[in-house]
Amino acid sequence: MSPELYLSYPSAFLIGLLGSTHCLGMCGGISASLSMALPVGSGFRFRQSLMLLAFNFGRIASYAVIAAGVALLSTSAADQWAELGGVLRTIAGLLLILMGLSMAQWWQGIRYVERLGAPVWAKLSPLTRRLLPVRHPGQALALGVLWGWLPCGLIYSTLGWAALQPTVGSAALTMVFFGLGTLPSMLATGYAAGWIKGLQGNRLFRKGTAVMLIVFGLWTLPLTAFMSH
């Protein structure tokens, strides 16, 4: 695969940032609940920050682990099928387009893709309930690790990009940058849940970010017409 196929880390960060309103719907509730479970008093902000950072660190760590697994599989397969890079990039572009259509509420076809992860989540979701209510950062970290496996079209879209990376480490790092892109909104949900909820419901903001995600997806497609080497 040629170097131009590889998603730059700033681009992964930007995808996470643009798509973070979708993350609010998927993970925002649990992030806000971490703050609400804490007793108000001396040191509240410090304890709140520890909880939110631990949860999000666990979540991003899971993204990196999943990306490493996907990269191992795709690298092995690429040794047998030289055209796999073009196929993966095409899939990644289409998934980003579907994600944008979903965020704009024009079409919810991404939900069919999210169902692919349902069997794994069915096994893990009972474990998350055992960690609630969260009382210390260790529980928040464990909850984040489990929550990172929640079926999510935006994650799957970026995993398609991560699979194009030349090494397993760079694939994992791509998802770390993606996760860091989602971090501002996720932290803000814990600190200012009401304001973020209003932003999420803003039709113009939602459709603007959706269009940018669609543009990201379209940008990939002309380069992926089953490249021959």
Image (cartoon, rainbow, N blue to C red):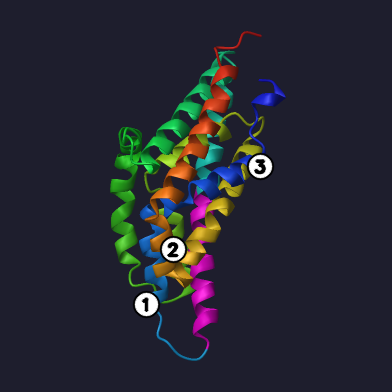
The image shows residue 107 at horizontal and vertical percentages of: 32, 34
Work out which quarter of the rendered image holds the N terminus and state it. Answer: top right
Residue type at numbered disc 2: Ile
Task: Say which amino acid is labelled 1.
Answer: Ala
Asked if the magenta segment contains residue 203, the reply would be no
Pick whichever, 177 or 133, lies toward us: 177
The secondary structure making up most of the magenta span is helix
Q: Residue at x 59, y 48 (%)?
A: 176
Of marks 3 and 2, which one's residue comes earlier in the chain? 3
Farthest-out residue, top: 228
Residue placed farthest to the front in the image?
Answer: 204
Q: Residue at x 40, y 55 (%)?
A: 202
At label 1, counting other C-alpha atoms closer than 10 Å, the crowd grade (few under 14, some 14-19, many 20 or more) is few
Q: CA distance from mark 3 to mark 1?
A: 35 Å
Q: CA distance from mark 2 to mark 1?
A: 19 Å
Where residue 222 sits: x, y (%)? 57, 18
Q: Which residue is mark 3?
A: 9
Q: Residue furthest bottom?
A: 42
**Circle 2: element type:** helix
Which residue is drawn at the image coordinates 45% and 62% (left, top)? 142
Residue 148 visible to the viewer: no
Q: Secondary structure at mark 1?
A: loop
Q: Quadrant of the C terminus?
A: top right
Give the label on residue 37, or none: 1
Which contiguous range is marked in magenta? 43-62
Q: Position of residue 105 (x, y in %)?
A: 33, 41
Task: For marks 3 and 2, give the CA distance.
Answer: 26 Å
The mark that comes first in sequence, 3 or 1, is: 3
